[in-house]
C-alpha cells in the first residue's frame, strides 16, 4: 500500500504522517510512506487544503487529521482491495 502525506511539512502534516504510520503498523499491512511537499504536485491531486492523506493514489482526507479509528478504517479498506 502506498500512503502519501500531502503538505508543506507543518506540525499537522507531521502528525498526519505519524498517525498513518501508527495505524498501518497496528494493522500489520505492508506500506510505503511518502511525504509530498511540492505545491504543484499537491495541486495535481486537486487538493487545496493540507494536510491531505492519499492512499494508493486516491485522496482519502483533506484538511484534517483523522482519528486513529478513522485512519485504521481507511487503511484496512484499502488493504482489502
Image (cartoon, rainbow, N blue to C red):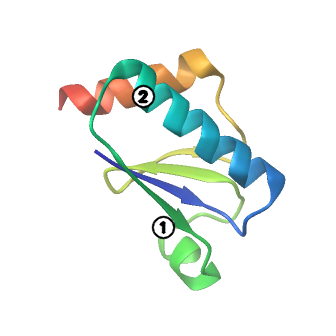
Local SS, label 1: loop
Residue at point 72% right, 41% down?
64
Toward the right, the furthest residue is: 11
Instruction: Report which residue position mark 1 lands on.
Output: 45
Toward the left, the furthest residue is: 81
Classify residue 30 as left or right of residue 8: left
Instruction: Report which residue position mark 2 lands on.
Output: 25
Residue at point 71% right, 53% down?
13
Residue 59 % position (x, y): 46, 51
48 or 64: nearer the viewer:
64
State how many labels appear.
Answer: 2
Residue 52 % position (x, y): 61, 52
Residue 23 % position (x, y): 49, 26
Residue 56 % position (x, y): 31, 51
Spatial distance from mark 1 to mark 2, Cα to Cα?
Answer: 26 Å
Classify residue 6 as left or right of residue 9: left
Residue at point 42% right, 28% down?
25
Quadrant of the snapshot with the C terminus: top left
Q: Is residue 74 visible?
A: no
Quadrant for residue 28, please give it: top left
Q: Is residue 73 above or below residue 62?
A: above
Quadrant for residue 8, please give it: bottom right
Amino acid at each position: 500500500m502506498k500512503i502519501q502525506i500531502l503538505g508543506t511539512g507543518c506540525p499537522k502534516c507531521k502528525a498526519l504522517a505519524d498517525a498513518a504510520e501508527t495505524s498501518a503498523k497496528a494493522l500489520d499491512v505492508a506500506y510505503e510512506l511518502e511525504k509530498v511537499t511540492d505545491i504543484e504536485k499537491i495541486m495535481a491531486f486537486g487538493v487545496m487544503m493540507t494536510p491531505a492523506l492519499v492512499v494508493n493514489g486516491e485522496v482519502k482526507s483533506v484538511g484534517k487529521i483523522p482519528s486513529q479509528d478513522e485512519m485504521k478504517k481507511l487503511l484496512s479498506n484499502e488493504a482489502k482491495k
